[in-house]
Amino acid sequence: MVNCNNCKKDFEVKVRTKQLDNDAEEIFFNCPECNERYTAYYSNDKIKKLQEKLIYWSRRNGKATRCIKWQEDVEEEMNRLKEIYSAS
């Protein structure tokens, strides 16, 4: 359960995905009471591929310098998408 910042009602999150363009998508949920929208994150093919590498390498080798760099790349790309799409 989460509590809506707008109407203060508790609700269960139902995650939804919205395709923004050919590659990017927004993952979000809405308050069922007041329809306040909460963006969880943005994603694209680049982020998904980096996350697959992170999962593979972290399971295979544990924490490695390569994994840390990929995680930084994921965060950088998510922030780039947030800047592009959060103003829309």
Image: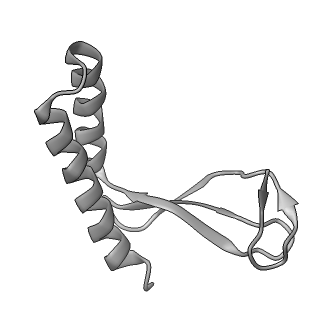
- Quadrant for the C terminus in the image: bottom left
Question: In this image, 83 relative to 67: left or right?
Answer: right
Which residue is drawn at the image coordinates 65% and 72% (left, top)?
37
Residue at the left extreme, as displayed? 66
Residue 36, picture quadrant = bottom right
Residue at the top extreme, as displayed? 60
Whether residue 46 is visible, yes or no, is no
Q: How many marks?
A: 0
Question: In this image, 72 relative to 8: left or right?
Answer: left
Q: Looking at the image, which is closer to me, 78 or 63? A: 63
- Horizontal and vertical percent position of residue 12: 79, 51
Q: Looking at the image, which is closer to me, 65 or 11? A: 65
Q: Looking at the image, which is closer to me, 58 or 46? A: 58
- Horizontal and vertical percent position of residue 16: 61, 55
Which residue is drawn at the image coordinates 31% and 67% (left, top)?
79
In this figure, which colouring scheme has been used for the structure?
one colour
Q: Is residue 55 above or below residue 24?
A: above
Which residue is drawn at the image coordinates 25% and 32% (left, top)?
54
